[in-house]
Image (cartoon, grey):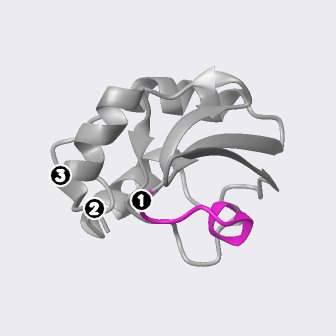
Amino acid sequence: MLSPHDLSRLATALGGLPVLGCMTGSPAEEAGMRYGDILLSINGSKTGSLEEFMHARTQCQGHMVARVFRQGLELELAFELRPAVKTPLETLEELKSRGILPSGSNA
């Protein structure tokens, strides 16, 4: 298993974002996304930065197809989004507090 630092370096080289974890019970987790995946795109939109990720995520209309790189293969994970219980900022802060995103990240 790659360390978070090495995973981040690989994600940068591939033009994606490292997946350092998923919220328990989230649609992404239920679809199979996991630590070590590299998120390359959402519904065809690149996710090479947090800004690109947030933009792509806000464009989703309930259905998401995430293209991820895992162990040398590109996979597609499809799932339905649920209505947000928390605001995007609250979710971002929770991800930072859980160590899934670095605390210095500002999307």
Q: Nearer the viewer, residue 24 or 70?
A: 70
Q: Quadrant of the C terminus?
A: top left
**Start-end of magenta stretch:** 28-36
Where does label 1 land, which residue?
Answer: 36
* Residue 9 drawn above or below residue 80: above
Where does label 2 land, which residue?
Answer: 2
Using the rendered view, name the quadrant where residue 16 is placed: top left
Relative side of 3 to 33, left or right: left
Marks 2 and 1, the one that precedes in the sequence? 2
Using the rendered view, name the quadrant where residue 21 is placed: bottom left
Q: Quadrant of the N terminus?
A: bottom left
Element type where label 1 sits in the image:
loop
Relative side of 35 to 41, left or right: left
Point out the frontmost of discs 3 and 2.
2
Which residue is depicted at the point 35% across and 38% down?
Answer: 11
Tell me the distance, in whole angstroms, between the alpha carbons under discs 1 and 3: 11 Å
Say few, some or many: other residues with alpha carbon within 10 Å of mark 1 (under 14 / 14 to 19 / 20 or more). Answer: many
Task: Report the amino acid beneath label 1.
Answer: Gly
Tell me the distance, in whole angstroms, between the alpha carbons under discs 2 and 1: 7 Å
Where does label 3 land, which residue?
Answer: 5
Q: Nearer the viewer, residue 47 or 54?
A: 47
**Residue 22 place in picture, x, y as percent:** 50, 66
Which residue is depicted at the point 28% across and 58% down?
Answer: 96
